[in-house]
Amino acid sequence: MGGASYKILWDRISTRGRQRAHQHHAECQFGGAYIERQQDKNFAHRDINQSSLYLKRGLDVTVAILFLIILSPLLMIIATTLKLESSGPTIFAQRRVGFKGKIFKIYKFRSMYVLEDGAHVSSAKKDDVRVTQFGYWIRRTSIDELPQLINVVRGEMSLVGPRPHAVVQDQYYCEAIPNYVLRQSVRPGMTGWAQINGCRGEIKNIDEITNRVKHDIWYIKNRSLLLDFQILLRTVLLVIFSRDYY
């Protein structure tokens, strides 16, 4: 192969590489538009008809409202205890990235002394000194997540779906992990396929978050109302019997 042929081949490879890099950057910056294109290819709606999507949304709202009513006495007790234990708001609102890349505020009972929601957000670690004494208990039982039922009613989340990440974390993961942005093709969830398969807690390296993303994409491709029910049931069992939450 002559020098000219090598140059033509190299130019083609370089051009394709630049195109892939530009596309990946665009996916991270314009997640909503990219997801629209994926939906046109039936990625987000594979084997899911429109009536099933409406039914899932209806069940989300019904179950969320029902639990908010039933658990209202417990929620009041939790809020009062948090207020008495330490200063600060009862509900912690943090910006997360949701459906089609839209940023929303996720609600949680405040379980830490700090309220991180900026350029630096650190995930909770085992024996984390930032966690309050009562906060440790509500994190251990996942009760701190119950205010997200409000997010479900508002249409920002679903009961089941990929767990949303803080904005600064989401931006980093989107740049570092191929297909990460595909998680935004569905509403984020209070629990998900990744969580019931051991992908929860502190993220120590890129391999761990990559594994979570693989589970999330598997769920999106295979999701159904029956699968959602199985995930919810296994989540309840994990909360009751697992000792890994912190």
Image: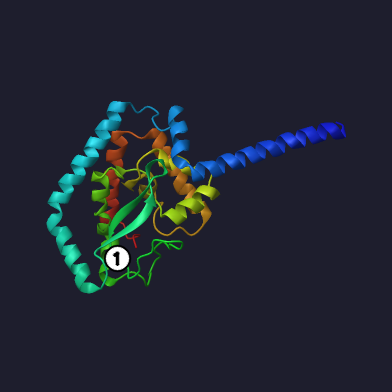
Find numbered disc 1 in the image and state the secondary structure of the residue it sits on.
loop
Residue 246's image quarter?
Answer: bottom left
Locate residue 38 relative to residue 233 in the image: left or right: right
Measuring from the top left, give residue 130's x and y in whole percent.
Answer: 36, 70
Residue 191 can be seen, yes or no: no
Residue shown at 30% from the left, 71% from the top: 132
Locate residue 158 relative to residue 185 in the image: left or right: left
Residue shown at 15% from the left, 63% from the top: 77
Residue 242 can be seen, yes or no: yes
**Quadrant of the rendering where the N terminus is positioned:** top right
Residue shown at 19% from the left, 43% from the top: 63
Characterize the local packing of mark 1: few (<14), some (14-19) or many (20 or more) Cα atoms within 10 angstroms. Answer: many
Q: Which residue is mark 1?
A: 111
Type of the residue with mark 1? Ser
Measuring from the top left, give residue 53's x and y in whole percent.
Answer: 30, 32
Locate residue 150 relative to residue 205 in the image: left or right: left
How is this picture coloured? rainbow
Residue shown at 21% from the left, 69% from the top: 83
Residue 73's image quarter?
Answer: bottom left
Q: Nearer the viewer, residue 192 or 28?
A: 28
